[in-house]
């Protein structure tokens, strides 16, 4: 191993937040053109390590870090992300950093816009050069194409599905000319499997052109298929650093959690007899939703009270559009009957008020109150929408928060969902990505909805905790008789918890099957082969 | 079909305020018994007089700083420039140009200061800029009342108070109408000052060109999301200061154009209302504190003044009391600003609620 080939060397790096140690003696190296997979449980310290590398302000503000980092043999200690950018490090964060009102092209070229000089700029300086829209578009197009996706550079970010946003962010990083090291913090968490595949291919291409990549993901199969090298973090300590060759998923999972992970499914599926086909809680007729990239054309289905109803299907077929449309996040039409009452569409507040709740797949836009503690985050919606956790005096004249009840509720969910935190008073901002996702779920639970939509609930959750989250959903369903509609791109996940599963294809329900149906049956529905017959069948069902 | 009705709906929602004002005017015009010719003449005069001032508000809105009530600082700078050229006896267009040249550095300085203050009050720019206007107007008055004629030489006694120092309350300008007289043409009985209009067209071209420059793009980025702009390496604070400086300088020129049309300076309380009226006009034109276009500015100025002209008369004819009409006029202009601000606060609140309802805020504010 020649020294000259090494791009990044991390030496004895450690970090603590106010006495809470999250990284200890971290060592690893990365060669040029290599892809390094960084894995670890939620809260293991992956994002923190990357933030150190990228010179993020939080690190400085919380007292800096210990140890040394060398880039190209030179010791670095960035004071700001800008310095990191200038040294050729690009980073895609777990949270989006795009400007919603700008187009894809404007975002990709943010602050590196293509400009043309003009008379005035010659006198007053470069900042008055005119933006060259044509060149911008061309350049953005090239960056997008490098990734192997097809997105119009003129689309506004606010009108894009979350997967496309992710691609735009990555396109922005690779568009910089001298990028040597690309850090991708869970880029695939918001992507569907097919989108993720496209991204992996693009990463390989980049690596082949000499860019080194650090890739964080909870989807271990991705790590195995793409990475040259693997680093496993557990509680802030490097457990393993080795080539990925010959490593198995189960093995990685064990390194991550430090015990053997059983693959058994404990969640049980209810029997058909438990349901009353007459007791329909939600009926959807001729629903259309105009959600870019996930258009719903004509969807019909009925959900029985108390069941867990799954919605699956390939990316872009419209499964995500269904909850987003019913909850009023995208323009929609059709007829939705909830609890025998007609539900007005395109009205989010009304939907919440009628007892619906939604955990969005766009977990980076889910709107936690980042500067509020965990307990407030969990209780806030319930307080606002349903007057829960509020004590009243003098017949409601004086109201105040029932802090004790809030605390108890928060503690309960912290325990149930195993949210890794110092206490229920820790600010949401200080939680790791996966743990923020868990808080979102707890928040929806605390609303005590009659019907809960969850979209991709286990995204960003580590292997060990996935089952925990699914178990919590099932338990919640059983204890409160809450009907749950779960949208997921992972069929296995749906099959392990749902009672019935609808497969959406081309904006329509291709068929609804019992979770006990065979994988092949589902596969056929997804591929659309059996569509004609199935469509007839599903119409009968309705 | 669906798309068409959707975009029509959006257009109607976006233009709700101007439409409301058009409706009110349509009802009030016949009541006022003004002739069409009179109205057209008045509107044309006022459009040429005020549009520039209103346009000066556009850039800070783009940079996410809301309505720059600090533009009164620019107006004050413009007035100081005019006072000096009047003292030196420079007339006509030359006088106005020199007034602009003198006041530009003052406006830049004030804009820089104002931008710096606003950077410390992120999220509260509008109220801060309003306070700042009041504060600076104190200094402005001190400067004119006590320093001019004592420390700063003023030779023209007509400008000074009888006590020997301090500028008079009202000053007649030698430069009155200088821009307006350029290329003045009568079209169907309506005098149109193409000289001033050309200046306004130039500033419109400047503004739309500016939006397409790198600096303009940076301002839009900063206005939309300071955090993202910052992490992309855009100098957020500097950009914000620049937008305020440009706005202040433009307001300074705007005030000069305004005053040459009026012909006299109301030394001590002329500038205060400039910002309020300009803001009201912009909002009447359908702008919001987060989005404003050239069209908003022009349409708004026209409508606001139409209202201003017909309302008192309509009120008088309706109630027989001139007071009531006057009262209503004031009520409308202050009311517009208040309502627009309240609406904006309400919308922000709603957005936040939606946020809290844990959904992404995809409320389409721009475009
Ligand atoms: N600003 C902060 N202040 C205090 N503690 C913090 C802060 N940022 C992160 N932490 C803590 O550091 C630990 C590691 O967090 P980190 O975000 O690095 O986890 P992660 O490995 O990226 O997890 P995930 O897979 O969930 O994204 C967590 O326990 C978190 O609570
Ligand atoms: Mg993380």
Image: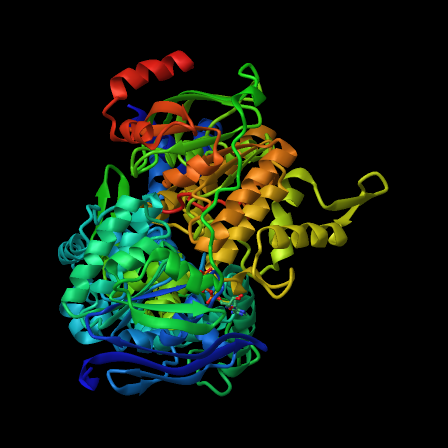
Q: Is residue A453 above or below residue B199?
A: above
Residue appearing at x 47%, y 27% in the figure = A345
Q: Position of residue B231 (x, y in %)?
A: 36, 68
> Toward the viewer: A491 or A147?
A491
Q: How is the image coloured?
A: rainbow
Find residue A274 and report its image quarter: top right
| Residue B354 showing in the rendered view | no
Q: Is residue B272 above or below residue A324?
A: below
> Which quadrant holds the C terminus of chain A?
top left
Residue at the top extreme, as displayed: A540
Find residue A123 and report its image quarter: bottom left
Residue appearing at x 52%, y 77% in the figure = A16
Find residue B227 and report its image quarter: bottom left
> Which quadrant holds the N terminus of chain A?
bottom left
> Toward the viewer: A175 or A308?
A308
Residue at the right extreme, as displayed: A394
Q: Position of residue A191 (x, y in %)?
A: 33, 48
> Toward the viewer: A264 or A166?
A264
| Residue A244 showing in the rendered view | yes
Q: Position of residue B159 (x, y in %)?
A: 46, 74
Q: Is residue A222 above or below residue B162?
A: above
Q: Position of residue B28 (x, y in %)?
A: 48, 30
Position of B192 compared to B22: left or right?
A: left
Residue appearing at x 51%, y 60% in the figure = B126
């Amino acid at each position: 191993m020649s020294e000259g080939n090494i791009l990044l060397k991390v030496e004895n790096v450690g970090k603590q937040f106010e006495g809470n140690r999250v990284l200890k003696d971290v060592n690893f190296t990365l060669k040029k053109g290599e892809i390094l997979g960084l894995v670890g449980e939620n809260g293991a310290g992956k994002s923190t390590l990357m933030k150190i590398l990228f010179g993020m302000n939080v690190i400085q503000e919380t007292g800096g870090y210990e140890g040394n980092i060398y880039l190209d043999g030179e010791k670095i200690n960035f004071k700001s992300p800008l310095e990191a950018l200038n040294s050729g490090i690009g980073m895609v964060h777990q949270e989006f950093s795009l400007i919603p009102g700008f187009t894809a092209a404007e975002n990709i070229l943010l602050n590196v816009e293509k400009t043309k000089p003009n008379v005035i700029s010659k006198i007053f300086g470069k900042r008055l050069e005119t933006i060259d829209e044509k060149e911008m578009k061309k350049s953005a197009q090239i960056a997008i194409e490098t990734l192997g996706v097809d997105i119009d550079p003129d689309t506004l970010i606010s009108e894009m599905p979350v997967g496309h946003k992710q691609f735009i962010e990555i396109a922005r990083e690779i568009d910089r000319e001298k990028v040597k090291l690309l850090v991708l913090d869970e880029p695939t968490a918001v992507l569907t499997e097919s989108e993720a595949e496209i991204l992996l291919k693009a990463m390989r291409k980049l690596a082949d052109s000499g860019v080194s990549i650090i890739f964080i993901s909870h989807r271990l199969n991705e790590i195995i298929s793409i990475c040259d090298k693997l680093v496993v973090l557990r509680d802030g300590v490097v457990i393993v650093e080795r080539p990925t060759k010959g490593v198995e998923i189960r093995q990685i999972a064990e390194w991550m959690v430090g015990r053997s992970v059983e693959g058994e499914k404990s969640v049980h599926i209810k029997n058909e007899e438990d349901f009353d086909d007459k007791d329909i809680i939600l009926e959807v007729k001729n629903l259309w939703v105009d959600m870019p990239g996930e258009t719903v054309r004509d969807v019909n289905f009925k959900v029985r009270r108390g069941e867990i109803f799954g919605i699956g299907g390939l990316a872009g077929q419209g499964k995500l559009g269904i909850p987003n449309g019913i909850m009023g996040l995208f323009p929609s039409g059709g007829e939705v009957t909830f609890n025998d009452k007609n539900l007005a569409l395109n009205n989010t507040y009304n939907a919440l008020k009628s007892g619906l709740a939604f955990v969005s797949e766009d977990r980076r836009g889910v709107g936690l109150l980042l500067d509020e503690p965990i307990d407030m985050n969990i209780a806030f919606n319930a307080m606002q929408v349903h007057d829960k956790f509020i004590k009243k005096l003098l017949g409601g004249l004086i109201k105040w928060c029932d802090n004790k009840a809030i605390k108890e509720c928060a503690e309960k969910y912290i325990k149930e969902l195993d949210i890794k935190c110092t206490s229920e008073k820790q600010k949401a901002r200080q939680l790791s990505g996966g743990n923020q996702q868990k808080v979102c779920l707890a928040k929806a639970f605390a609303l005590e909805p009659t019907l809960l939509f969850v979209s991709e609930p286990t995204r960003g959750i580590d292997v060990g905790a996935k089952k925990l989250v699914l178990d919590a959903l099932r338990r919640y369903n059983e204890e409160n008789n809450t009907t749950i509609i779960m949208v997921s791109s992972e069929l296995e996940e749906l099959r392990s918890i749902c009672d019935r599963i609808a497969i959406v294809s081309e904006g329509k329900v291709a068929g609804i099957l019992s979770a006990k149906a065979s994988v092949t049956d589902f596969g056929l529905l997804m591929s659309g082969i059996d569509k004609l017959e199935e469509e007839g069948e599903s119409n009968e069902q309705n | 079909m669906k798309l068409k009705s959707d975009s029509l709906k959006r257009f109607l929602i976006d233009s709700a305020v101007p439409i409301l004002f058009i409706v009110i005017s349509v009802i009030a015009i016949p009541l006022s018994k003004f002739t069409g010719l009179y109205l057209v003449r008045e509107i044309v005069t006022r459009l040429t007089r005020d549009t520039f001032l209103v346009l000066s508000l556009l850039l800070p809105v783009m940079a996410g700083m809301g309505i720059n009530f600090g533009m009164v600082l620019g107006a004050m700078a413009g007035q100081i420039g005019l006072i000096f050229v009047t003292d030196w006896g420079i007339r006509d267009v030359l006088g106005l140009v020199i007034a602009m040249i003198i006041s530009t550095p003052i406006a830049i300085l004030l804009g820089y200061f104002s931008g710096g203050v606003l950077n410390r009050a992120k999220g509260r720019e509008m109220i801060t800029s309003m306070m700042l206007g009041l504060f600076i107007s104190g200094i402005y008055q001190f400067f004119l009342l006590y320093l001019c004629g004592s420390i700063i030489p003023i030779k023209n006694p007509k400008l000074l108070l009888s006590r020997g120092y301090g500028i008079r309350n009202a000053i007649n300008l030698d430069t009155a109408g200088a821009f307006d007289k350029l290329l003045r043409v009568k079209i169907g009985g309506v005098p149109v000052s193409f000289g001033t209009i050309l200046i306004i067209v130039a500033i419109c071209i400047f503004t739309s060109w500016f939006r397409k420059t790198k600096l303009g793009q940076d301002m839009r980025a900063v206005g939309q999301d300071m955090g993202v702009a910052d992490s992309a390496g855009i100098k957020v604070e500097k950009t914000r200061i620049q937008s305020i400086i440009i706005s202040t300088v433009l307001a300074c020129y705007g005030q000069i154009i305004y005053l040459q049309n009026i012909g006299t300076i109301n030394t001590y309380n002329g500038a205060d209302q400039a910002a309020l009226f300009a803001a009201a006009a912009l909002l009447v034109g359908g702008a919001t504190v987060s989005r404003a276009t050239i069209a908003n500015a022009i349409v708004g100025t026209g409508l606001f003044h139409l209202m201003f002209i017909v309302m008192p008369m309509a009120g008088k004819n309706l109630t027989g009391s001139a007071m009531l009409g006057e009262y209503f006029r004031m009520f409308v202009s202050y009311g517009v600003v208040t309502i627009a601000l309240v609406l904006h606060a309400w919308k922000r609140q709603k957005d936040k609620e939606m946020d809290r309802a844990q959904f992404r805020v995809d409320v389409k504010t721009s475009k």
